[in-house]
Amino acid sequence: MEIFYPVAALAALTFAVLFLTAFVRFRAAFAGRVKGRDFRYGESRDVPGDVSIPNRNLMNLLETPLLFYVVCVALFATRTVDAAALMLAWIYVALRFAHTAVHLTYNNVFHRLLVFAAGNLVLIAIWVRFIWQLR
């Protein structure tokens, strides 16, 4: 069951960024910085960067992390959760938190890329271990 703790932590981060996205958008709308039409087809080029970044981070949290959720459920269903899988899961979640922290604060693209790539390598490792255990 412990595999669901990192899953819950990542889900909590995703919900936090979801609420932040709404907060930032409404604040910008009330300040007259954006209009409803700016979001009609996603985000138009008229949306200021500080308003679009939380939404972009939310999209990141809904893309490759889907593969994390799937493999965690698969590990649980096949009863192959072990200490190494738990460690890798927590490392992946920590890297997702780090990616979000960089993205939503000083947003250095190189630093963001490093933690994003590291997280993806950890995710690949989780999948490789899982597939290897199925043999």
Image: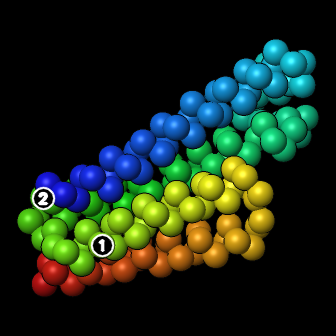
Q: Which residue is under mark 1?
A: 87
Tell me what residue is drawn at x 32 percent, y 52 percent. Answer: 7
**CB of mark 2 within 8 Å of CB of mark 1?**
no
Q: Nearer the viewer, residue 115 or 130?
A: 115
* Residue 41 image label: none
| Three-letter code for the amino acid on which mark 2 is drawn | Ala
In the image, farthest residue toward the left: 79
Residue 121 shows up from this direction: yes
- In the rendered image, residue 2, in percent from the top left (x then y), is placed at 18, 57
Residue 131 is situated, as x and y percent measured from the top left of the image, at 23, 78
Residue designated by label 2: 77
Q: Residue at x 76, y 67 (%)?
A: 109
Looking at the image, residue 51 lies above or below residue 83: above
- Give left or right: position of 133 versus 90: left
Residue at image coords 37%, 61%: 68
In this rendering, the answer to whether 30 lies above or below 111 is above
> Could one spot residue 40 in this view of the protein?
no
Q: Is residue 69 left or right of residue 96?
A: left
